[in-house]
Amino acid sequence: MEQFHTTLGQTNYLAISIFFLFVLITLAITYWAARKTNTTSEFYAAGRNVTGFQNGLALAGDYMSAASFLGIAGMVATKGYDGLIYSIGFLVGWPLIMFLIAEPLRNLGKYTFADVVAYRFSQKPVRIAAATGSLMTIVFYLIAQMVGAGGLIKTLFNLPYEYAIIIVGIVMTCYVLFGGMLATTWVQIIKAILLLGGATIIVLLTLSRFNFNPLNLFEAAASQYGDQVLSPGGYISNPWDAISLGLALMLGTAGLPHILMRFYTVPSAKEARKSVFVATGFIGYFYILTFIIGFGAMVIVGQDVITGKIGTIGDKGGNMAALLLAEATGGTAFLGFIAAVAFATILAVVAGLTLSGASTLSHDLYVNVVKKGISNEKGEVQVAKIATISLGILSVILGWIFKGQNVAFMVGLAFAIAASANFPALLMAILWKKFTTKGAYLSIATGTILAIVLIFLSPTVWVDLLGHKEAIFNMKNPALISMPAAFIVGIIASIMDKEPSAEKIFEDEKLRTYLGVGAE
Amino acid sequence: MENKGLKAQTLVNSPEFKELVKKRWSFSLIMSTLMLAVYFGFLISIAFNKQLFAIKITNNLTLGIVLGLGIIVFAWLMTGVYVQWANSSYDKTVEELKNKL
């Protein structure tokens, strides 16, 4: 087979032009959105005027990060079937969001998921705890995205790492600062359409070489790399590890603050549920595409190029697989387009994270803790904007500090905290009448601390990063321990501690929870 | 206002409302359990019997690929079933109860 040569790593002017066009268009949208973004409900929730379908696309946009596009395609390209097992974990949390969380969250809350965790409890301790869990999730996710962005852009645009993260930092801060949730939502929608469209074209170009029959592609993969690429390999060997990671991915999705925040942008619980249906459909479709893209890259580009055995572009994780395939099937111009889409993807995801972090800082901590719930519209928006700028600067600094570090574990950590700190408290607040203030903050603290400590002692950090011989905690993801622990602590603390006022509010707010009467 | 508040309290305590809450969580619980069972069933089967997933249904189409892609489609269909149920059954009761306020 002829050796495939890539232009990746050289300056691709078309990619740069398309990317700048994307930035220009999205900044124009931000300018338009800025005039409609004055009140808190406009800044945090786009005035609650987003339709269910639009929000579904925006949710998909928030969730389909560059890491899942490039990382999962790369995992399929290098390991075959195992990549599919991984991506399924990211999808199956969505139905749970639908069945357990979306509607009560929409009806009970205002801007953040902490609104629902805290609505019937003593505000200060619960808000602080929920805000901590929320910020931890956001910051670890943000670091992973920024470092990935810097490295990726370096390869795609031949641009120094530092420039790349500064550009990402400035542009995304502009979106959030001036256009709030409305601009961020439209950036997500445009990005989702570009990403889904781009991935669809790669798949069509790939399948055109196989008579549009995926089975022929699988056959080519099996004949080149052996039958084992078509069935599970070494990814799941220890069942406990598999269950633990599965829990983190599934329940972590249902505890991601920037995802949960999106349910406040739609006018009603009915639209909220519709948006989950739309989002799940698009995300599922996207994972099916990445599966085919992975096999396409394996066959057409070849594993040796993807993993860097031949040439200089590949890496062990196969992160360039999708891009190499785009070039191999569509030429340099198409590579430029996909590279620009990947950059836009990063931009949109960090904007969503930043907005959610800013709302936590201003709405949960400033208004509900410092100001004790007394908010004046103008002051709160101002604080949210200051928080946005601070987070923008922080994300650039963190991207700088972690340059060249292996931050892949941080996504796992973000999901572990979301599954252990955010999800249990949120679910118990929605469902359990006898849940108490103490139960809530102790549950969140247990989940957060256990997730962080255990991942630090796990093989991912203790052995792979710190170079110790044997891990103290022998599981790659801590969710199997930290998530049930958060539930147990929350339940025991609540049973030992009666809170009649919280039980009364739980009953009083039932019309709001179930009928949407009086919902914001 | 005072009058409306009283009625709201009566409504919350009415058998119809309690029935609605019960119906909502029973359905959610069944759907969630089904999703959890399918996903963890999938993971555990892989952990214990990889051979099963390598079985070829036709040329180069393994049972693993069918099941894997099947779960993605299944997850999406589940959200569709829920929307369908909520729009037709749940919302209807919600409207009836709201009208009583």
Image: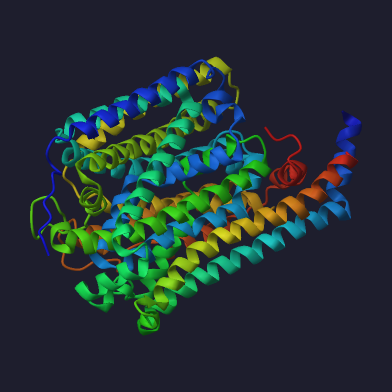
Q: Quarter-wise, where is residue A100 in the image?
A: bottom right
Q: Is residue A64 visible?
A: yes
Q: Is residue A114 visible?
A: no
Locate residue A463 relative to residue A311 in the image: left or right.
right
Locate residue A252 relative to residue A13 in the image: left or right.
right
Residue drawn where x is 45% and y is 50% of the image? A418
Q: Quarter-wise, where is residue A226 in the image?
A: bottom left
User: Residue A7, image x and y in percent?
Assistant: 13, 44
The N terminus of chain B sits in image quarter: top right
Residue drawn where x is 10% and y is 61% of the image? A2
The C terminus of chain B sits in image quarter: top right
Closest to the observer: B60 or A269?
B60
Check the image and tell me how it is coloured. rainbow
Residue A98, compared with residue B100, is above or below; it is: below
Residue drawn where x is 48% and y is 33% of the image? A185
Locate residue B22 relative to residue B37 in the image: left or right.
right
As drawn, the residue found furthest toward the front would be: A211
User: Residue B80, image x and y in percent?
Assistant: 62, 56
User: Residue A11, image x and y in percent?
Assistant: 14, 35
Closest to the observer: B7 or B97?
B97
Closest to the observer: A347 or B40?
A347
Residue drawn where x is 74% and y is 34% of the image? A518
Please count the marks in the image. Answer: 0
User: Residue A188, image x and y in percent?
Assistant: 44, 36
Q: Quarter-wise, where is residue A289 in the image?
A: bottom left
